[in-house]
Image (tube, rainbow, N blue to C red):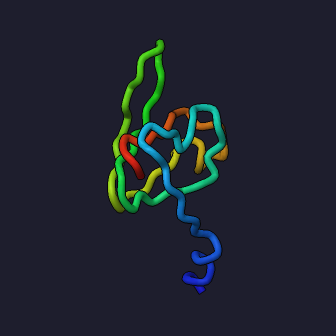
């Protein structure tokens, strides 16, 4: 049953280095698993990037504020390498 549900919901996507998975203000309705790559979450405060986390192979990535509250994301999520 779970396998069937997941097979309908899981989508494989590739991102290039520098590409944004999510930009501040967008609604995040997805939960990502990084199969291979490097991704960072960061805020922009006073025109300065403040990194808040980094995720790599086999880790989950999402906007906590956006995904669970269904609100615009407070952070940006960007790939640091092909992911």
For the N terminus, give its image quadrant: bottom right
Percent x, y for residue 80? 37, 40
Number of numbered discs on residues: 0
**Which residue is pictured at 33% across the width and 52% down the height?**
56
Percent x, y for residue 66? 59, 43
Percent x, y for residue 55? 35, 49
**Which residue is pictured at 39% across the width and 45% down the height?**
39
Residue nearest the observer in this picture, 62 or 20:
20
Residue nearest the observer in this picture, 14 or 31:
14
Q: Is residue 63 left or right of residue 27?
A: left
Q: Quick check: 83 above or below 7?
A: above
Q: Where on the picture, by quarter, is residue 57?
A: bottom left
**Which residue is pictured at 59% across the width and 49% down the height?**
67
Q: Quick check: 82 above or below 33?
A: above
Q: Quick check: 80 above or below 10?
A: above
Q: Is residue 11 left or right of residue 36?
A: right
Looking at the image, the residue that sits furthest to the bottom is 1
């Amino acid at each position: 049953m779970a396998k069937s549900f997941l097979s309908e919901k899981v989508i494989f996507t590739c991102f290039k280095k520098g590409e944004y998975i999510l930009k501040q203000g967008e609604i995040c309705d997805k939960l990502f698993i990084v199969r291979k790559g490097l991704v960072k979450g960061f805020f922009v405060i006073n025109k300065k990037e403040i990194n808040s986390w980094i995720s790599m192979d086999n880790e989950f990535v999402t906007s906590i504020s956006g995904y669970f509250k269904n609100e615009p994301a407070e952070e940006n999520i960007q790939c640091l390498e092909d992911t």
